[in-house]
Image (tube, rainbow, N blue to C red):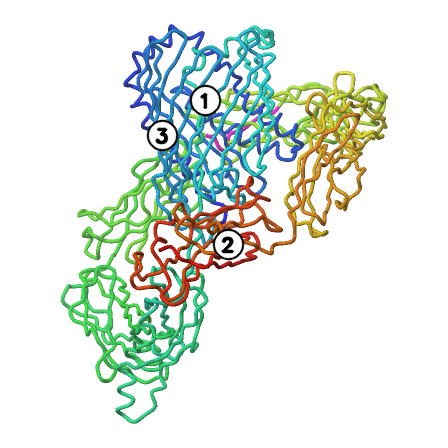
Amino acid sequence: MKINRYPPRKGLMKSMAIMQILLQTALPVALSMSATVRAAELSQNTHSADKDNINSPYSAQMTQAATALSSGNAAGAGASMASGYAGDSVEKWLSQFGTARVQLNVDDKGNWDDSAIDFLAPLYDSQKAMLFTQLGLRAPDDRVTGNFGLGVRTFYTDNWMFGGNVFFDDDFTGDNRRVGFGAEAWTNNLKLSANTYLGTTNWHSSRDFDDYYEKPADGFDVRAEGYLPAYPQLGAKLMYEQYYGDKVALFDKDDLQSNPSAVTVGVSYTPVPLITAAVDYRRGQDSMDETHFGVNFRYNFGQSLSSQLSSSEVQNLRSLAGSRYDLVERNNEIVLQYKEKKQNNAVADMLLTTVKDNSPADGVTANTVTVRATTSDGTPVRNTVISWSIVGGAQQQAKAAAGSAADDAALSAGSSVTDSNGNASVNITSKTAGQVAVQATSGDISRTATTTFVQSVGSLDLVLTQNNSPADGSSQNAGKVTVKDTNGNVMSGVAISWGVNNGAKVVASDVQSNAQGEATIHYTNTKGGAVTLTASAAGKTASVNSAFTSQSEVSAVSVTTTTNNAPANNSATNAAQALVTDGNGQPMANTSVTWSISGSSTATLSSAATVTTNAQGVANVTFKDSVAETVTIVANAGGRSGSSSAIFTQTAATNILVTVQQNNATADGTSANTVVAKVTDSSGQAVANAVVTWSVGGSAKATSPVTVNTNASGEATLSVSDSVAESVTVSASANGAQGQATVTFVPAVSSVFVAVTANNALADGSSVNTFRATVTSPSGQPVANTSITWSLSSSTANGTSSLNATTDASGNAVLSVTDTVAETVTATAKAGNIQGQATATFNPASVEVSAVTVTVPTNNQMADGSATNQAQALVTDANNQPLANVQVTWSITGSATVNATTPLSVTTDSNGVATLRFTDTVGENVTVTAMAGGKQGQATATFVSAAFGPLVIELEHGTGTSAINVATVSDGLELTVDAYPGMAEGDQITASFKVTGDVNPDSPGGTILPDITLPVHTVTASEVGQPIVLTFDGSGMLGFQGETTPLTGTGTAIVVKPSTQQQISDSTSRVFDTW
């Protein structure tokens, strides 16, 4: 089985974004159908229906943080919190229409495969019935899967809800689809549901395995979830699921099973609404199992803490009213089954395609031809050799007729090998223009394709033969292009394309070069100015500038400022116009005018820089500025220019916003705090060049000018220092407007003293040692509001609060530390360049082993003395938490030949797991036992016998004679396969029976002797070690007798072990006479 390694998909987020847009557009329309009914209903049931929705806006983030930290994945907590916040935002928007469950998870490689979204929205909602839709999107194993469901829930029976639903699941990535039907029966403290899944997609190529087909597996599940009415904090659930087919991926695609089933049991405990703990265990056939642990914290900032710590509130979470809009519980991921493809590597057809054509015939640039080789069923043929050859073409025929060698065309290779898609390619070059026929051959299959080479143009020489004609629409400029090849020879018959701009029109042009390699063009224009002439041929382009002279030239450009004194707010505009006249003083229409501004770095044009004069010869422009100043507006036309000045006036300052850019400088008379004043006008636009006057309170002094003009952004800056630790007010005023801000100067730090205020805590991960850092100035006074950075010497020690802190009014900062390892830990506190440290001790924690759970993750190895089974012991405490560094003693019973390859006395790792590996030389079951802290657990491991065979079979025969007679076959002929060495579940037995010899032509049975092969029999677990009886139908064996010699009946059995493809067989014969 070859795994098809697909790269991580990045289309999931795009798909989820599209789905959210559709939900935002479609759901409000759909929900309007029941808006009035639901409004009345919700007003009556606000208390009961909202009990499950009492959540903090940040409960999802708190849950993700707790889960990440409790699992030891502190490094990923930040990413989980960020994605959790995004999911919470989407979930809150969707929850205003129904029930939403959003999960956006990103791993350390940036993959979003575990993300999912589910949403339930009522379409019709009344007191007795509800019609709803449920949508979902997820991407398990890089498969983007969508779920669409419709359902109904009825409440006609007191305290009971009965409902049904239908779902359509679509694996968009793998092209798999199925339909599901479900039923629900809920009451207070109990939920019952059942689902069936039916695949609607036939076998098709698998995206997981190259040599396999896949399709959805049919199946069903039955679920129950309940809570104790007298003690609603305790809940339990039970689920059974069954899927049908061979090679079904129920647990994962690496462990395929036949008709797999699984049972899931789980318990949960909710002491108060704030917290819930749960554990689920799932076990299927072939010793497949998995366990999930979870702790959930939920806090509502809008509800008192006392109510969320009250156990009486848990009852409301279990009511039928509270679960009315719960999501349908079903398996939203499509379970797949696989089937191996039959391999057929014979080439039956080839498709030849020219993927690159019309290259120049320069002997270097290549055309490309690709062949796709397929089998009779259309499957690509990989790793097959394709032979290439040139079989002819127009140029080869011309060469042969002229008596020269047909060697102008060449192949890049004489043969190539097809890739995984059955494709192979070859490049062809040619020195002569024309067609070349390329042939691909594989065995007896040949295909031919034609590729074309065009003349190779080396250069285009473009010159003007007529220029500077009058722009009167009839006088013509003219050009000529000469086409030459790479050797400098002129080329005839080359297609030429022409181009002109600036309003010029082509009067006449040659479309291809003549015998001298030349082509000409003639063109006119009605307006003066430059015209670029372009000639193109075979990928080459040449151009030349020409000109048409205007019949009247610009004599003068007169510029006038028509709007002036606009406010310099970068919005209001001044305006100007240019009058263009000829030598007679007449206005010139349709004349191009180009505007520019001089004398300013901030003024810009608000309208187009190049315009055309109107019928009166006038061109207009508008322009703006952000600085109060005088600028010059300039107009250029026909080599003439004109200008005018314009004034932008100062805008009145109406608001000053002072912000602190740098704060908490040391009060040493040198270090500076920085403030910025932002001056704006009444419209909120920045006021440049405004005069700002600064004033400073307290003992502080300005270290930059106190009178300054604002910059183009309307900002003015002041730096302030102080020699006294204090907070001072800094004020800024401009044009009667005023603003202020407060800056703080902190004492200089002289020392950081760290003391241990609580010591000798237990290294249990929760008990704390406490450190206190005291920051003092050179005069010995405590320094408040100083940033402290803590660091710890141990990788297992953790602070219970942030390692970045600020000293309080007494100059103190406190850090509490936990540890899981008995050791000494040094805590260092650093303030600026000054630091101090202290050391605390964590003592060993006393733990009590509650349970030892033994599993055999590696089992059923060969009993060859080298292959190893592996057992693991999980040691946990009373809270079901794993215990690290606990001594575990292993023992193995039930065999004298088993041998441990790892020590029998070990300690658990950080996950509370101890491991044992062992071998055997005899196929048998052995018991593995682990003991720790007075507790023990055990499991059974199996070694499979390394021997296989020999095989012995027996044929049934009549009483008192060795012949197979009428009595023998009347109720079926039995063939017995005796138990054989190495017999194992899954072995495949093929049995056959054949009669040979000369048959009596008068036999009632006819002249065609029996030849029967039974279907393959697969050995079951209960048949291992027992004889297996296989029966041939005897109805076709009656009425046969030998003519001169007896007939012979031979039975044969072949046993194949699928895991190794080993094979054993045996045959036995009897005289056959059934007449």
Mark 3 lies on a secondary structure that is: strand
Above or below 1051: residue 235 = above
| Magenta range | 686-694
> Which sits earlier in the primary sequence, circle 3 or circle 1?
1
Where does the image place residue 755, in percent across and percent down from the top left? 85, 22
Instruction: Name the residue that disc number 2 marks.
Output: 2
Quarter where residue 15 is shown? top left
Residue at 46%, 67% in the rendered image: 383
Mark 1 lies on a secondary structure that is: helix
Mark 2 lies on a secondary structure that is: loop
Q: Does residue 530 show up magenta in the picture? A: no
Quarter where residue 333 is shown? top left
Residue at 70%, 37% in the rendered image: 872
Q: CA–CA distance between discs 3 and 1?
A: 25 Å
Q: Amino acid at mark 1?
A: Lys
Instruction: Name the residue that disc number 1 marks.
Output: 92
**In the image shown, does 635 or 901 lie closer to the viewer?**
901
**In the image shown, does 1022 or 745 lie closer to the viewer?**
1022
Observer-side mark, 3 or 1, equals 3
Instruction: Name the residue that disc number 3 marks.
Output: 167
Observer-side mark, 1 or 2, equals 2
Q: Looking at the rendered structure, which numbered label has been put on residue 296?
A: none
Is the C terminus in the top left, top right, bottom left or bottom right quadrant?
Answer: bottom left
Q: Amino acid at mark 3?
A: Phe
Where does the image place residue 984, in percent across and percent down from the top left? 58, 47
Q: CA–CA distance between discs 2 and 3?
A: 33 Å
Where does the image place residue 154, in percent across and percent down from the top left? 34, 14
